[in-house]
Amino acid sequence: MISTCPVCAAEVPAQLRGTGTAVWSCCWNCEAQFQVTRPAPAAGHTGAGSGLPPARWAPAPDSQIATVLTRCKLYRREGRLLDVGFGEGQIMSAAAAEGWQCWGTETSQAALDAGRRNGWRVLGGDLCRIGLPGALFDVICMAHVLEYLEQPAAYLREAIRLLRPGGLLFLATTSTHATESLPQAHWQCYLQLFTTTAVRLALETAGYTRERISVEAAQTSPRSRPTEGLPPGQADLPSSSQLLGAALQQFFRAYPAGEQLTAFAERPR
């Protein structure tokens, strides 16, 4: 049983709730919800376990990926992009076609084998233990990875180490609203669910610059999510952030993970 919130490290409160075989708690500090009782990870492992669920790999339309990659061009210097938990490799495949030098990490052996057959530069195992050189990438993508990790904060710290100064992190994760909009059997595979406060605190604690953070919560379920327009609150963002936020939400809509939070953050220069 864990004694601190895996997102912000606050002490676990006494108030718990059970759902089937799992025991969940809600953090008083960041409002993230997380499983208090969970399987022990392998020795020395800080990541996601033996592999991420195939449901996370649902394909996104090519037009949506192209929209995100268009925004990535604003951060292109050396041209290196890392996709953490690349799944079927849609992002890497599309980015490589636009001239990016693409890298990917996965814990799923099936995904790694498929990636190597496609000739991609893929690395197996826990991102925090692979040992890539620092300041290597212009852009890092982390789509629906944090909710499955034993130590999500460790991945955010490693990502900022791997980004060059001024580099961009693209992030999407599942919101606590998933418990209301999805069947219990679906969201119980997660180790934690996030709020906008939890995402913001996690990014700030890892060292990302606050002024460069934009977090949007999807306001509708995947079955009824609109295909046009901006979500509530989006209009309050600066124009450049508004465009990038809209692009991110458009892309990550395709992932069948229920209510979602999307964000981007930069490593300080």
Image: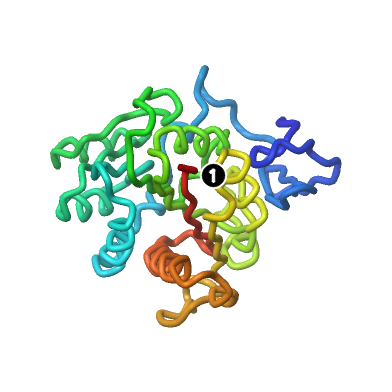
Task: Pick the quarter of the image with the C terminus.
Answer: top left
Which residue is pictured at 22% across the width and 52% down the height? 95
Is 136 rendered above or below residue 269? Answer: above
Which residue is pictured at 80% across the width and 48% down the height? 28
- The percent position of residue 181, horizontal first and vertical second, equals 59, 67
- The percent position of residue 101, horizontal first and vertical second, equals 20, 42
**Amino acid type for the residue under numbered disc 1:** Tyr
Using residue 14 as the reference point, say whether residue 213 is left or right of it: left
110, 121: nearer the viewer: 121
Task: Pick the quarter of the image with the N terminus.
Answer: top right
Which residue is pictured at 14% across the width and 42% down the height? 118
Is 224 rendered above or below residue 2? Answer: below
Using residue 265 as the reference point, say whether residue 184 is left or right of it: right
86, 29: nearer the viewer: 29
- The percent position of residue 44, horizontal first and vertical second, equals 51, 18
187, 79: nearer the viewer: 79
Is 89 rendered above or below residue 178? Answer: above
Which residue is pictured at 86% across the width and 41% down the height? 14
7, 240: nearer the viewer: 240
Using residue 163 as the reference point, say whether residue 149 is left or right of it: right
Answer few, some or many: residues within 10 Å of disc 1's Cα (few below 14, many 20 plus, some between 14 and 19): many
Q: Residue furthest front?
A: 269
Which residue corresponds to mark 1? 208
- The percent position of residue 32, horizontal first and vertical second, equals 68, 50
What kind of element bears circle 1?
loop
Q: Residue furthest right?
A: 14
Give residue 159's quadrant in the image. top left
